[in-house]
Image (spheres, rainbow, N blue to C red):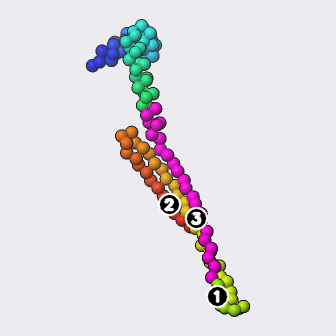
């Protein structure tokens, strides 16, 4: 068992006998023990580092859309009695994606796309 765990266990037992809360015991011990204070600050710093690393690799959501229109004309007949026919093609492409870069370098991506 770690010496800090043993110390905390002993202090909590003594605090209970004196009517102190666990938080009060820890704060009092931290105020009078530089080694414990340094260890607790290192733990807090490590927690913030972990949160920062996780936030660095948040998932990215993307969306795309594009449109296209083509028109072609065809002339039928000859002389003065011809006719013109215009063909139009319209297309809309759209999609959505989500991607995530993992800490060890792997990229995960999911893309859905369709057209109308």
- Check the image and report above or below for 62 versus 9: below
Q: Which residues are magenta?
A: 52-74
Residue at the far left in the pictured view:
1
Left/right of residue 70 with respect to residue 38 in the rendered view: right
In the rendered image, which residue does mark 2 sit on? 113
In the rendered image, which residue does mark 1 sit on? 76
Q: In the rendering, at what x and y percent does residue 54 appear?
A: 44, 36
Q: CA distance from mark 1 to mark 3?
A: 30 Å
Q: Nearer the viewer, mark 2 or mark 1?
A: 1
Q: In the rendering, at what x and y percent does residue 74 appear?
A: 63, 82
Q: CA distance from mark 2 to mark 1?
A: 39 Å
Residue at the far right in the pictured view:
80
Q: Nearer the viewer, mark 1 or mark 3?
A: 1
Circles 2 and 1 in contact, beta carbons < 8 Å: no
Q: In the rendering, at what x and y percent does residue 115 appear?
A: 54, 65
Q: Quadrant of the N terminus?
A: top left
């Amino acid at each position: 068992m770690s010496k800090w765990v043993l110390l905390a266990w002993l202090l909590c037992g003594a605090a209970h006998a004196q009517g102190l809360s666990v938080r009060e015991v820890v704060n009092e011990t931290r105020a009078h023990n530089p080694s414990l204070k340094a260890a607790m600050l290192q733990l807090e710093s490590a927690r913030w580092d972990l949160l920062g690393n996780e936030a660095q690799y948040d998932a990215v959501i993307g969306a795309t859309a594009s449109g296209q229109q083509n028109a072609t004309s065809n002339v039928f007949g000859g002389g003065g009695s011809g006719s013109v026919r215009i063909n139009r093609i319209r297309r809309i492409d759209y999609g959505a994606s989500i991607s995530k870069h993992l800490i060890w370098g792997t990229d995960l991506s999911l893309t859905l796309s369709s057209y109308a």
